[in-house]
Image: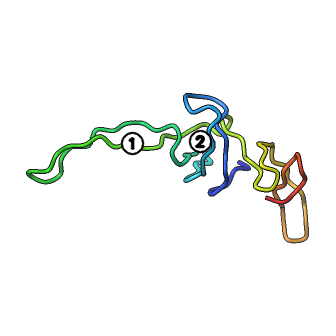
Amino acid sequence: MKIKKGDQVKMLAGKDRGKIGKVLTIFPVEEKLTVEGLNLMKKHVRPKKEGEKGQIVEIPRRVDSSNVMVVCPKCGKNSRIGLRQSKSGKLRICKKCQTEL
């Protein structure tokens, strides 16, 4: 998977289509990721202690990696990611402006 933790991504599908968020976690085996503030689900939480009230918490759900696209930090456009070989290893580059990510 070419998307890394901390990347800015734009949602291409779903209820949050067109919104931009930061990648929180990656699940490479499943090809899924979670994005901060997007694709939220509501979860009902029971009270833990006596006298405490139950509450509804919003938790980000996993999104398939095919439904997001990386936003280049330099040109600001959403673009595909390419790999370029260098002496230090493989570098991720923006396909539109050819800069390193």
Give the left or right position of residue 75, taking residue 61 as reference: right
Return the residue found at the far left: 50
User: Residue at label 1?
Assistant: 58
Task: Please tell me which residue lies in front, 66 or 15.
Answer: 15
Comes first in the chain, label 1 or label 2: 2
Q: How many marks?
A: 2
Report the coloring of the rendering: rainbow
Q: Amino acid at mark 1?
A: Glu
Residue 93: image quadrant is bottom right
The residue under the point 67% across, 41% down is 10
The residue tagged with tag 1: helix, strand or loop? strand
Q: Residue at x 42, y 36 (%)?
A: 41
In the displayed structure, 42 sits above or below 91; it is above
Q: Which mark is residue 30?
A: 2
Report the amino acid beneath label 2.
Glu
Distance from label 1 to label 2 (Cα)?
A: 22 Å
In the rendered image, residue 17, in percent from the top left (x then y), is placed at: 62, 31
Q: Residues within 10 Å of mark 2 (few under 14, many from 20)?
A: few
User: Position of 87 compared to 41: left or right?
Assistant: right
Q: Alpha-carbon neighbours of circle 1 within 10 Å: few (<14), some, or many (≥20)?
A: few
Residue 71 lies, in percent from the top left, at 73, 47
At x 42%, y 44%, the residue is 59
